[in-house]
Image (cartoon, coloured by chain):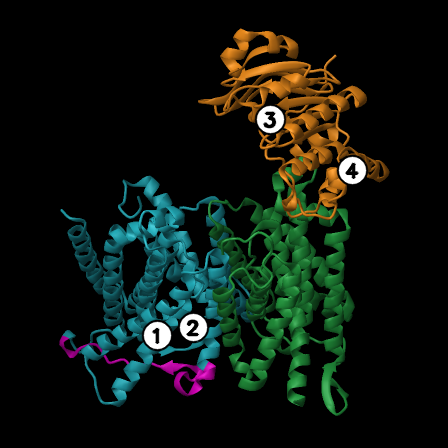
Amino acid sequence: MTTGLRHLLWTAAAAAALLAVTYAIPPFRNYQLATAAAYLCATAGLTVLVGLSGQLSLGHGAVMAVGAYAVALSQNRFADAGLTGNGVLAASLALGVLAALVAGLIVGLAAARLRGPYLAGVTLAVAVALPAVTTVWAGVFHSDQGLSVYLEPPPAGLGYDFPLERWQAWLALAGALLVMLLLANLVRSRFGRSLRAVRDDEVAARLAGIDVARTQVLAFVVSAGCAGLGGGLMAVLTQSVSPGAYSLTLSLFLLMAVVVGGLGRLAGAVWGALLLVVLPDLTHTIVASLTLSPAAAQRLEGNLPLAVFGLTLIVVMIAAPGGISGVVRRLTPASPLRR
Amino acid sequence: MDRFLFLTVDGLAKGAVYAAFALAVVLIWRAARIVNFAQGAMAVATVYAAYSVTQATGSYWLGFAAALAAGLLLGAGIERAVMRFVPHTSPLNSVIVALGLVLLLQAVLGAIYGNEFRPVETPFSRTGITVGGIALLSRYDLFVLGAVLVLVVLLALLFTRTSTGLRMRSAAFAPEVSRLLGVNVAGLLTFGWALAAAVGALAGMLVVPTELGLHPNTMDLVFVSSFTAAVVGGLDSPIGAVVGGLAVGLVLSYAAGYLGSDVTPLATLALLLVVLLIRPGGLFAGVRTRAV
Amino acid sequence: MTLLQVDGLVVGYSAAPVLHGVDLTVPPATIVTVLGANGAGKTTLLRTLSGLLRPAEGGIRFDGRSLVGVPVERVVRLGLAHVPEGRGVVAELTVEENLRLGGVWRADRRDVRLAQDEVYELFPALAARRKHAGHQLSGGERQMLALGRALVARPRLLLLDEPSLGLAPRITGQIMALLRRLCDETGLAVLLVEQNVRSALSVADQGVVLSLGRVVAAADAAQLRDDAGLRHAYLGF
């Protein structure tokens, strides 16, 4: 059985299982599942970039914003023009991916000439500059306030009382599965091998006839496209976009998810995306169980997830650089995503 | 023309802070080959320490001293407790750990002090002194410039005139040889982090009371500008960091003055990209060129 | 009487040790040369003595006290200076700063200054280039600087790793002669690792031949010079 076929079967099996899950869980959990799926698009893309090509991006939150704003603008334009239907949403998401691909190409072209801390610095500057973009072109992006996103109710064919959250979960899961299928095949392809070769030894890769700069730019573009889809889906879920939702902190969260999940392993991206949803939920529960003054509770609830994420990032980097999937892999038979 | 003069003077005052902060970045880069992305968050933490001390005692200067002391402790503590244990398998490791510190420090500060902006008082007036009909530097700007000048002179003396400075340079360039010559390289690394964090604390104390206000994330943009300044200077060169800081201050001041203050982050990004793509080693690249 | 006493030194991973039980003594005011082919373990021996590597087994006693586990930066304070292979001049620092570095741990600043002046007297070429950076020096000047810098610490034992590497024979000769003089006049002991067997044996009092991490011969230098069989077997001339 070829790898491609095996990946396809896995994806189909996952889709069937997830479909069943969306019927079994309440709307709120479906919404969380959808959120994790949207994050997964971004973390999977970032995993390929950081883990396989060794380029660090602190700007993937901003790339998600590009996708989200593109989807928002496109959805609203279509709605204003009286165009509706699910083909329109697909077109908007495609536009979101396209916009992110272009953004990825621009950053990637610059990034291919930069290494390590310099690249991190540039992408950090991108993340920090994002709110300024929305302010400078306030006529389009509406500054800090952001845009609301038009979203149609689920297709009538699904039934009158079909929950919106389940529909959102379907959309996001479809996107995430698509990304995973694409990336799983990509990392096993020649391109994936080139990426690892460049990461491990640039000079040797060059001697082996690999176009280092092109490989790195391509990695950035692919990774940005995935993040753009994630951002677009996020816009569909929250039905709004604003710079505050795509701050530097989001970029750092994504990085944390990728590192904690396990750098360079797509399975790690899944763990990371789940963690991004579960941890804040968990800290919320913990804070709620403490007896605190309302002000203290609010301060703690907003900051505890950050503290946990930060601490996790530090501890994992120092104690278990393989991340969660590294630990899981040690307990289970070999998985195919890393040589 | 008056406006240009005003923007120039204002840019130099801002640039002095960037220069100080860039010096902190360069200090750690030289000592440990790490770009400390947590520099901004560490500086904010020390400014909060100063804020608490000033609130409790009513004295700006006690707060000022507390910030510097907190910087020394925080820098040394982070090197001893965290950075020392980061595996050296990839240069990304230390960057990622520093980012983890950013999240952790900002969260702790937010949990203690809350996430709203707090205004911070300046020890001197911020109203510009009028010279020949043009409002130029304020007393506070003069204080900033003076403090940075003192800092630069002290650092220059430390590195060129003292035995500790000689040891620090040697430990950074040739750690193994330095150990053979009796230099306590590990101890100096801790000292380097402490010193850099104190310098960062000074920069934070100078910049937060201006337009920023105190907030856990308040130094994010200042860090990016100062990182740009350090890159302009070549990361390895303290003189480069100072010149880079002033240059960045001027560019941002003109951009804000002529195009609107909203473009400042975009101008920083553009400047950083231009410098990295045109002269990756920085304008003050040292004798040994390094791959970027 | 011995200054340095090495007993059964084993260094490296248990599967493939680099040194397998090396014994060695260096008396005061003596030049002992360690000879052997590439990979014999000479550099490993010196790096272990100065604390850069930790022995798996065996003892190192210097002036009656054990050096095992003493941190590298402490070893020089006990009177043992190591000039590493490739000389270790700090390229970014000037000649003067490199020399200052040699005495940076010493409290007696006056004697440090005196020692620096003595180095400039020993090597007038360095005196002329005080303000030059290390990377501007020739190979011979770098070797002089590394040696001089070690002397500023006023060591009782000098560990020298391939001082003749890449140097013209004339300069090598000068350096060897200087070592002999320091040994005779100041009582300095030298453990000299060399590939250049002839010049090493011409100046040394004793010689030790290492092969694949073991001592295969230890004798007076003159004896080694005259033992044709040994020379052929291990030293290749």
Chain B takes which shade in the image? green
Q: Mark 4 touching mark 3, by CB under 8 A? A: no
Residue A245: image tag: 2
Label 1: which secondary element: helix
Chain where mark 1 sits: A
Residue at disc 2, secondary structure = helix
Residue C22 appears in the picture as rendered: no
Read off the residue under disc 1. A68
From the viewer's perspective, tell me whether residue C6 is left or right of residue A79: right
- The residue at the far bottom in this view is B133
Separation of residues labelled 3 and 1 (CA atoms): 60 Å
Q: Chain of mark 3?
A: C
Chain ID, mark 4: C
Q: Which chain is orange?
A: C
Find the residue positioned furthest to the front.
C170
Q: Residue at x 62, y 65 (%)?
A: B44
Q: CA distance from mark 2 to mark 4?
A: 66 Å
Q: Which residue is mark 4?
A: C120
User: Taking C40 as reference, is B90 above or below it?
Assistant: below
The reply to whether the C-beta atoms of the residues labelled 4 and 1 are less than 8 Å apart is no
- Image: magenta residue range: A135-157
Q: Is residue C142 left or right of residue C130?
A: left
- Where does the image place residue C216, in percent across and percent down from the top left? 54, 11
Q: Disc 1 vs disc 2: Cβ atoms closer than 8 Å?
A: yes
